Image (cartoon, helix red, strand yellow):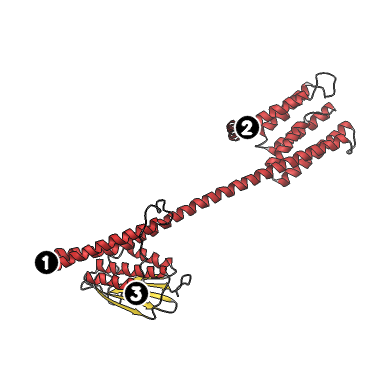
Amino acid sequence: MQHLRASLKEALRARPYIFDTAVAICVYAVILMATSAGPGPGPELTPGLAVAGVAVSGALAFRRRRPLGVLAVTVAGTVVHDAVASSRSPLILAAMVATLSTATLVPRRTAWVAGTAAALTLAVSRMLTSHETWLHPEIVGLVAWLGMATAAGDALRSRRAYVAAIEERARRAEQTREEEAERRVMEERLRIARELHDVLAHHIALINVQSQVAAHVLDDEPAQAREALGHIRLAGRAALEELRTTVGLLRRPGSPDESLTELVTEPAPGLDRLDDLIGSFTAAGLAVDFRMEGDPRPLPAPVELAAFRVTQEALTNVSKHAPRARATVRIVYTPRDLVVDVADDGGPLKAPADAGHAGHGLVGMRERALSVGGTFTTGPSVTGGFRVLAVLPAALGVSSA
């Protein structure tokens, strides 16, 4: 039953003219029932009344399109019939329905002005035809009924506006939630991509360099080739270990099978692991000059992680694009900031400073620095190579100068 009612309501909403036509027919039927063919309490049914009833009732079929025009037609039809017939007319019912519809469809001020004008017009017309004073119960009742029709229409319009506003707020809230969910998904994708890139790019670059070394010295210096293969094995093992740790960290929050699988994770890398990081590059044949300046002190984990990843990616770029260059890594502690400065001299073959450095690495480093409120710049170094400079705040929430 409820489904049938909802379907009927939806059909009428899609085709409002059907409902309006039904209202017009019902009003005309009531007008006819309010009359009598002979002597009786109601007005006599005459051809003029029947035609006027068709006119004013038929106008109600257009009440949504031209509410004020329909109200004017019904009031005018009632006034004309009262004047011609010199008797009370049941056509007042059509005027009341038109008043209700007008108050529902037009702004409040317009509705009350139109309702007042209709009430005064019909009251004056009835006073002239019945020769009664304005305090007569029939005149007062006429004005009261039209006033109640206007008030009911105004209340219905206000309720519809209130419901529409609630639905619009709900729609906007739902849209905002969907946009927020999409934004969070995109941020999570970027975070995962950045983590995987930072974890794998360094080790894969070392594997690539060591494999080239092994292939080059395999015939003449097998001992050095075996050493390079050993570095490849260690780099591959480290890559798998860090990948396993990263995947475990990504799966840990809200993982449905966390109770079934114990996820063994390691702390995120920080500045205390820079020596191991630089050692892996020097073992791969990259000359690195590492200097730490200032007063070393513990920093927030996100800042240390960002500094570590920026250093890692910068050295990875050097090993890929200028493997015979000499790199310089400076970690400078200042009272407000942590400065990460990685530069290379370009190596024996001086290439343009920005050549070959395009890709996701620079984007990832920039995102790392910005995520903790720092700054990130790149450009040519004074020795002809490439320079990466990140200035990170020593405390989260404090923008670097």
Viewer-nearest residue: 253 or 64 = 253
Which of labels 1 and 2 is toward the front?
1
User: From the viewer's perspective, is 382 left or right of 174?
Assistant: left
Task: Give the crowd class for mark 1: few <14, some 14-19, many >=20 residues within 10 Å.
Answer: few
- Residue 371's spot in the image, x, y percent? 43, 65
Residue bearing the label numbered 3: 341
Residue extending farthest bottom: 294
Q: Can residue 387 be seen?
A: no
Q: Can residue 167 be seen?
A: yes
- Numbered disc total: 3
Residue type beneath disc 3: Asp
Which of labels 3 and 2 is toward the front?
3
Viewer-nearest residue: 123 or 189 = 189
The first of marks 1 and 2 along the sequence is 2
- Give the structural element (helix, strand or loop) at label 2: helix
Q: Residue 136: which quarter of the image?
A: top right
Query: Is the residue under label 2 in contact with that under label 3 (CB below 8 Å)?
Result: no
Quadrant of the rendering where the C terminus is positioned: bottom left
Viewer-nearest residue: 133 or 259 = 259
Residue type beneath disc 2: Tyr
- Give the structural element (helix, strand or loop) at label 1: helix
Q: Which residue is painted at 76% across and 31% down in the image? A: 93
Q: Report the Cα–Cα distance between label 1 and label 2.
A: 93 Å
> Of the numbered discs in the image, which one, if any, rests on residue 222?
1
Q: Which residue is painted at 55% across and 47% down in the image? A: 171
Quadrant of the rendering where the N terminus is positioned: top right
The first of marks 3 and 2 along the sequence is 2
Seen in the picture, residue 352 relative to 70 is either above or below; the reply is: below
Residue bearing the label numbered 2: 17
The first of marks 1 and 3 along the sequence is 1
